[in-house]
Image (tube, rainbow, N blue to C red):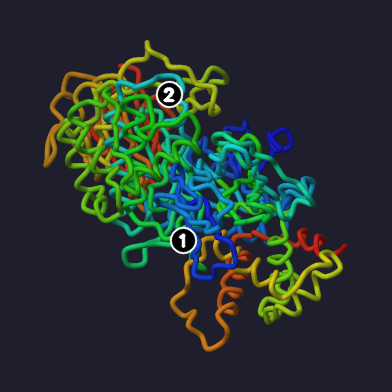
């Protein structure tokens, strides 16, 4: 289907390249071709084909996507992939796609799956696990269960942080449990759900289902192997069953770091009841005690081997995008520090790529060197990088900054048509030439 | 978590189904220390072992002289022979009838392997392998029974009453001349095991128990697309 789709216009988007094909949908990179600055210039389009299925299958697929859309429109957090909109494809020339649903999502650089394919035991593993656990904590706290946590569903963003994605199988809890479709990935299924009983509504999944999957994921990331032995998924399922009925103890890899052993052991507790004692919030606290609360400074960089997009906004490095499976590790890349920027803020750094000293604001500031918040280093140092991490705002998402105080252009600004030093859209981050020394900023409707 | 069900010979109604989880095994014979007893003088004390592995099972023939036969009752004579002393012969059938020759008699018991897996028809080849939730063999009779049960609703009448067992027998006869009420009931019971139906709390309805089971089967099958419109062609000879 990819050939038919490439170049296709879907709403404000033009499809560029296929990123992944799944059982129920395909994901494409797309670029925005309209003037709608409230949307990012690039995004991932998850397309659920409409025409190729029988009405019943289509109904089933619609239910799957409806679940994901429901979740993403109600939950937003910097550990969950962001959804921008849902578009119905209107393409009478392409019967396959006409009437299909396209979910427009934040574009990732790759997934934990692609990272692990390149690097066994990545240095950033512990930091990524902390972020995954934080995502689960957020989901569970909001009353949802992911239901299909695995490396392919942990996406890595340009700044090297991890976000949970693929909520097709996610289910909203009613009381202590939810009903999920009765399938999941074998290697991440807890013993009690292997061939579990099924009611009319599906099978019962609970937060402890995600906790087990997190334990498997952590073992894989930290040791390079799955915790249950066996050469095939079916053999590992047998091992899971043996462990689940108490016929065999759990034998974790000797490569598992000592500090992580109790955490992984608790995640992989034999029964739901034992596992339920360890919720994602308590696991996160224990993990942060190991990782030190902040992610490791140097996160892995995934860089596509082909098509690099030109810079999209002045002075900002465009998001670099590519297709799953085409990444290479780029060891010479500088380290990144954007993750330090609190959600709901705009952050300015005196080093490139979010490194160095940081000043952050959630509101406007007419004078950086006076008032409630003073950003001292800007007195004699330029801003070298910026990150607009304020997805929380319901209006005025973008941030404009000025060389003069009180949102007044000064110096070089006065020669620019925009009469300001610069402007950064929501979710954008990148480096500035060393000539920017703003003195004030304010949130604006659009750049 | 079981994957294999051993059904002792029908002449002993007290015997219950024996369920094995992967890597569990079951001894059978005239005097097994533990396991399934087959009370016939012509059977060895320790006649053999059934061991469950992944979704299939293997038969060990512990007798010194007798060859055991494993038949596929739905396989039009398909069978395999397991010679004396053979250890762990894998059996590929979902339904098996193990035949033991015993002093002129032929003793049998059944073994089911309801967890056999099939590729999900919806899954594309390049995607992540998502395990089919309810792997069904569309060539098996249970699939015909399920399709016949779902037919009225698939034909576009969402709240059509479920067909009675007699209606199902009638519907399937052209395809399956030997069909009877009992075989249809048997397949409904088997489907409930295979699809891991949880007995629903409100199944204590006044009607015969099989009605609750039928309704749950149909609603599960339609909810998860186990039977689609195109499968209905299988009901026509």
Residue tagged 2: A317
Residue A165 horizontal/vertical position (percent): 44, 43
Residue B100 lies, with reference to residue B201, above or below; the image says: above
- Residue at 47% x, 47% y is B27
Looking at marks 1 and 2 on the same chain, the residue that comes earlier in the sequence is marked by 1
Q: Quadrant of residue A133?
A: top left
The chain identifier of the residue carrying mark 2 reads: A
Furthest toward the top, the residue is A332
Drawn side of residue A163 relative to residue B18, left or right: left
- Nearer the observer, disc 1 or disc 2? 1
- Residue at 46% x, 33% y is A108
Distance of mark 1 from mark 2, alpha carbons? Answer: 52 Å
Q: Secondary structure at mark 1?
A: loop
Of residues B14 and A5, which is closer to you in this image?
Answer: B14
Residue B80 horizontal/vertical position (percent): 70, 41
Residue B165 horizontal/vertical position (percent): 70, 78
Q: Quadrant of residue A338?
A: top left
Residue tagged 1: A197
């Amino acid at each position: 289907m990819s050939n038919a789709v490439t170049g296709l216009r879907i709403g404000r988007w033009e499809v560029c390249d296929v990123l992944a094909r799944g059982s129920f949908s395909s994901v494409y990179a797309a670029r925005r071709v309209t003037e709608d600055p409230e949307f990012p210039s690039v995004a991932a389009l998850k397309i659920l084909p409409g025409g190729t299925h029988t009405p019943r299958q289509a109904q089933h697929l619609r239910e799957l996507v409806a679940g994901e859309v429901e979740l993403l429109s109600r939950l937003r957090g910097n550990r969950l992939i962001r959804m921008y909109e849902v578009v119905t494809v209107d393409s009478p020339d392409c019967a396959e796609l006409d009437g299909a649903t396209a979910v427009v999502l934040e574009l990732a650089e790759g997934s934990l799956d692609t990272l692990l394919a390149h690097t066994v035991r990545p240095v950033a593993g512990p930091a990524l696990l902390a972020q995954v656990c934080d995502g689960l904590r957020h989901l569970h706290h909001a009353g949802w269960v992911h239901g299909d946590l695995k490396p392919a569903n942990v996406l890595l963003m340009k700044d090297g942080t991890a976000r949970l994605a693929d909520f097709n199988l996610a289910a909203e809890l009613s009381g202590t449990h939810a009903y999920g479709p009765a399938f999941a990935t074998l290697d991440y299924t807890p013993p009690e759900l292997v061939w579990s009983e099924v009611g009319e509504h599906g099978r019962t999944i609970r937060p402890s289902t995600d906790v087990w999957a997190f334990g498997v994921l952590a073992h894989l990331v930290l040791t390079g192997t799955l915790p249950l032995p066996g050469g095939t998924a079916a053999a590992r399922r047998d091992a899971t069953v043996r462990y689940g009925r108490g016929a065999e103890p759990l034998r974790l890899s000797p490569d598992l770091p000592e500090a992580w052993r109790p955490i992984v052991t608790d995640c992989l507790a034999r029964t739901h009841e034992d596992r339920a004692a360890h919720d994602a919030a308590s696991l996160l606290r224990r993990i942060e005690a190991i990782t030190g609360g902040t992610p490791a400074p140097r996160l892995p960089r995934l860089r596509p081997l082909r098509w690099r997009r030109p810079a999209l906004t002045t002075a900002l490095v465009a998001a670099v995008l590519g297709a799953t499976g085409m990444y290479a590790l780029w060891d010479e890349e500088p380290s990144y520090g954007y993750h330090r920027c609190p959600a709901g803020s705009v952050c300015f750094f005196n080093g490139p790529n979010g490194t160095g000293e940081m000043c952050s604001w959630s509101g406007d500031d007419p004078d950086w060197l006076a008032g409630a918040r003073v950003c001292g280093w800007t007195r004699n140092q330029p801003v070298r990088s910026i990150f607009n991490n304020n997805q929380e705002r319901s209006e005025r998402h973008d941030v404009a900054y000025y060389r003069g105080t009180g949102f007044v252009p000064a110096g070089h600004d006065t020669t620019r048509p925009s009469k300001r030093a610069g402007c950064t859209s929501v979710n954008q981050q990148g480096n500035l030439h060393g000539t920017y020394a703003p003195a004030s900023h304010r949130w604006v409707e659009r750049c | 978590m079981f994957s294999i069900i051993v059904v002792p010979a029908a002449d002993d109604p007290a015997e219950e189904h024996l369920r094995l989880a992967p890597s569990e095994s079951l001894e059978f014979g005239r005097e097994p220390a533990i396991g399934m007893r087959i009370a016939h003088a012509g059977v060895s004390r320790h006649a053999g072992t059934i061991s469950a592995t992944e979704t299939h099972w293997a038969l060990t023939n512990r007798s010194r002289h007798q060859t055991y036969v494993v038949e596929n009752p739905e396989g039009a004579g398909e069978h395999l022979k397991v010679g004396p002393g053979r250890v762990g012969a894998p059996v590929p059938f979902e339904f098996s009838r193990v035949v033991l020759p015993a002093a002129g008699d032929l003793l049998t018991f059944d073994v089911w392997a309801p967890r056999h897996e099939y590729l999900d028809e919806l899954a594309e080849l390049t995607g992540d392998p998502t395990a089919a939730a309810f792997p069904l063999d569309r060539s098996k009779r249970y699939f015909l029974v399920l399709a016949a049960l779902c037919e009225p609703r698939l034909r576009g009448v969402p709240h059509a009453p479920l067909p009675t067992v007699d209606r199902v027998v009638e519907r399937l006869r052209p395809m399956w001349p030997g069909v009877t009420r009992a075989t249809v009931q048997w397949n409904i019971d088997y489907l409930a095991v295979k699809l891991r139906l949880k007995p629903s709390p409100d199944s204590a309805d006044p009607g015969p128990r099989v009605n609750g089971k039928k309704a749950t089967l149909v609603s599960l099958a339609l909810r998860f697309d186990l039977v689609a419109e195109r499968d209905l062609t299988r009901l026509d000879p």
